Amino acid sequence: MSAPIVEFLVTGDEVMKGLIADTNTQITASKLYPLALSLRRTTVVGDRPEDIRKALLEIGARADFCIVSGGLGPTSDDLTAACAAEAAGVPMRTYQPWLEHLRRRWAKIRPNETMPANNLRQAEVPESAEVLGNPDGSAPAFALMERSD
């Protein structure tokens, strides 16, 4: 039995423009290696929905697993979750436990400020996704299986 094929997708105009470096490939590869997994390929795309969807579909056709970095935050160019839902052919949903997590987190970090409405976007995930959480940030990681027709 051969090892699963794992690919990495990095999204973000700031990476494509050279404003920030893709350090996540190195970090991810170092975490996978002890698990007897290795990255086969990294793809980098900007914040264009059609490029993100196309990359997800292409990687899904080649790899057993696709790990995505970027595009899960509260800003308008954070498109990964919606693009993943579209690529999988499922709608988005609000994951209520994460919504409550966001509210608690905000109240703890900024108790005297109202959380901006755009931060609530981070509780939106593809309908069939399994929310994995995130111990370090406000956007949840999630697992999404490719739809089989």
Image (tube, rainbow, N blue to C red):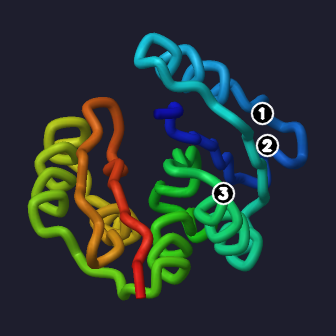
Q: Residue 73: x percent and y percent?
A: 47, 55
Q: Nearer the viewer, mark 1 or mark 3?
A: 3
Assign a secondary structure to mark 3: helix
User: Circle 3 is placed at which residue position?
Assistant: 62
> In the drawing, does residue 81 fall left or right of residue 41?
left
- Residue 100 spot, x, y in % from top left: 10, 59
> What mark, if any, has residue 15 been given in the picture?
2
Going from N to C along the chain, the mark reached first, 3 or 2, is 2
Secondary structure beneath dot 2 equals helix
Instruction: Give the numbered dot on residue 139.
Output: none
Mark 3 is surrounded, within 10 Å at the Cα level, by few (under 14), some (14 to 19) or many (20 or more) other residues, namely: few
Residue type indicated by callout 2: Val
Q: Nearer the viewer, residue 83 or 77?
A: 83
Q: Nearer the viewer, residue 48 or 33?
A: 33
**Residue occupying image coordinates x 47% and y 78%:** 88
| 3D distance between C-alphas at marks 2 and 1 | 5 Å
Mark 3 to mark 2: distance in Å?
24 Å
Closest to the observer: 132 or 115?
Answer: 132
Identify the secondary structure beneath mark 1: loop
Can you identify the residue that label 1 sits on? 20
Looking at the image, the residue that sits furthest to the top is: 34
